[in-house]
Amino acid sequence: MSTTPLLEQLIEALRCLPGVGQKSAQRMAYQLLERNRDAAVRLSKTLAEAAEKIGHCEQCRDFSETPVCQICMSPSRDKHLLCVVETPADRLVIEQATGFRGFYFILQGRLSPLDGLGPKELGLDKLATRMAHGEIKELIIATNPTVEGEATSHYLAQLARQFDVHPSRLAHGVPLGGELEYVDRGTLAHAFGSRLEMLE
């Protein structure tokens, strides 16, 4: 089926989104052009404005329209707690699901030499500078439980200890409400190896 060059460009542009293949991009393009041109114009304007005006916070590396984000400027946060996450989406999930009132540091990835992501790319020099000031007492490491996430967490823990900051890791293992017979072997092995003493 032949399409116009501009339509082909639109479909190809939509394919940059994660999980969007040729067919999904084609459906999106047709939906916007056939049924919702006003939304298509609004989407393009908002996307262009966001790409131009949203940068990264100088302190935590989260997305921000200002040099320092609202969380980093908040005087009500606990300056002794710093939670390290891989992505802004991880920060948002923790913020929405927990009562955490400390600060964050967003790596924008995880250590992955094959992908060219080393300590410099993750901003670990900035993190070290923050810990060197002496206010941070605990570094909560909330990287994902993947091979790269675990390697990153070990690196972060070693870095924290250099500045006498206590590193802690998010607990993970058997999910609440889960049954052992349905938990995968890797998760169960990790949970079993990381078991905790039950306090009275």
Image: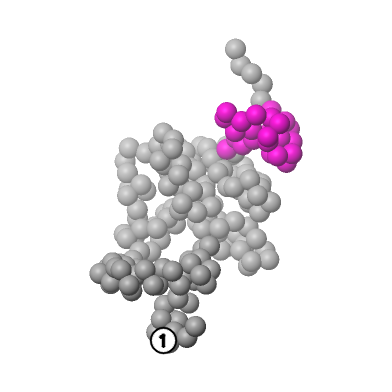
Q: In this rendering, is residue 57 above or below 38?
A: above
Q: In this rendering, is residue 15 above or below 174?
A: below
> Which of these two is toward me, 47 or 95?
47
Q: Say which residue appears at 45% left-offset and 47% top-offset.
A: 91
- Taking 122 as reference, is 54 left or right? left
Quadrant for residue 43, please give it.
bottom left
Circle 1 packing at 10 Å, graded few (<14), some (14-19), many (20+), is few
- Taking 92 as reference, is 118 left or right? right
Give percent across and percent down for residue 95: 41, 42
For the rendered model, the colour scheme is one colour
Could you tell me if residue 76 is visible in this image? yes
Tally of numbered discs: 1
Which residues are drawn in magenta?
170-195
Give percent across and percent down for residue 199: 61, 16
Q: Is residue 197 rendered magenta in the image?
A: no
Task: Look at the numbered disc 1 and give the secondary structure of its residue.
Answer: loop
* Amino acid type of the residue that numbered disc 1 sits on in the rendered structure: Thr
Quadrant for residue 139, please give it.
top right
> Circle 1 is placed at which residue position?
4
Could you tell me if residue 159 is visible in this image? no
> Which of these two is toward me, 12 or 70?
12
Q: Is residue 178 rendered magenta in the image?
A: yes
- Which residue appears farthest toward the left when viewing the image? 38
